[in-house]
Image (spheres, rainbow, N blue to C red):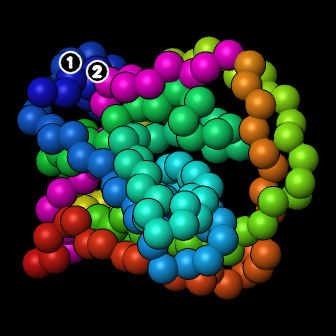
Amino acid sequence: MIEYDEMDPFGEKYKQKWPATPYSVRCVSDTHQGAVVAYVYVDGTLACNAVLLERGRNPWLMDFKGFQSNIDTLYTKDSITEFLFTVPRAEVGRRDAPKPPPNPDLGTVVVKFYRAETKGEVTQHENKASAGVHINPVSKAKLKDAKATTATASGAQVQVAAGAYQATSYHLIDKLFPCATFKFHYGSLS
């Protein structure tokens, strides 16, 4: 169960609880020669990324378990809050409030793979401890516009940021065009 503090139009606070199921996004790089950077987008928002290296005949496997706190940090060294499937929030708002613009990416997980190459240098990084990212599930009204019935939220922190570390630097060969894109519709279309 996840729980959120909400406020009604009159300013009174109340708690909302509903069930949630953790999930992860598994990426396997077994057909590409060289390094690939995988970018994971949840509901149209960049959630995390990592470099997948070639390992000879063995495929490189990466399980993205949640939202990355600092997208410029190495995924395995950053604070991570888990991905959760959940039902949408029952949002109480003002009737005269403007309607938010529709998001066509609600109910999707998209992974884009870009070819990368090493810069040939090892850099020193300093990670600061953080509580991780907090993502609220979207409201019922937003999901209705997107014709979806399931939302994503962030849950508990599943990984704490490491301190200082060294990493090889990579850059994307072609930033405009991914070498592969995978799109998964997790929200039921009605």
Per the image, the residue denoted by label 1 is 14
- Please say if the residues under marks 1 and 2 sit with CB atoms less than 8 Å apart: yes
Q: Residue at x 21, y 23 (%)?
A: 3
Give the residue drawn at x 61%, y 20%: 162
Q: Residue 60 or 11: which is nearer the viewer?
A: 60
What's drawn in magenta, residue-wise?
A: 147-163
Identify the residue at image location x=66%, y=71%: 34
Q: Quadrant of residue 122?
A: top right
Q: Which mark is residue 131?
A: none
Q: Is residue 136 above or below residue 156?
A: below
Give x and y (percent) for residue 160. Answer: 50, 19
- Whether residue 55 sits left or right of residue 21 in the image: it is right
Is residue 167 shown left or right of residue 22? right
Residue that label 2 marks: 5
Crowd class of label 1 (few under 14; some 14 to 19; many from 20; radius 10 Å):
few
| In magenta segment, residue 158 | yes
Return the residue nearer the eye: 148 or 9.
148
Q: CA distance from mark 1 to mark 2?
A: 6 Å
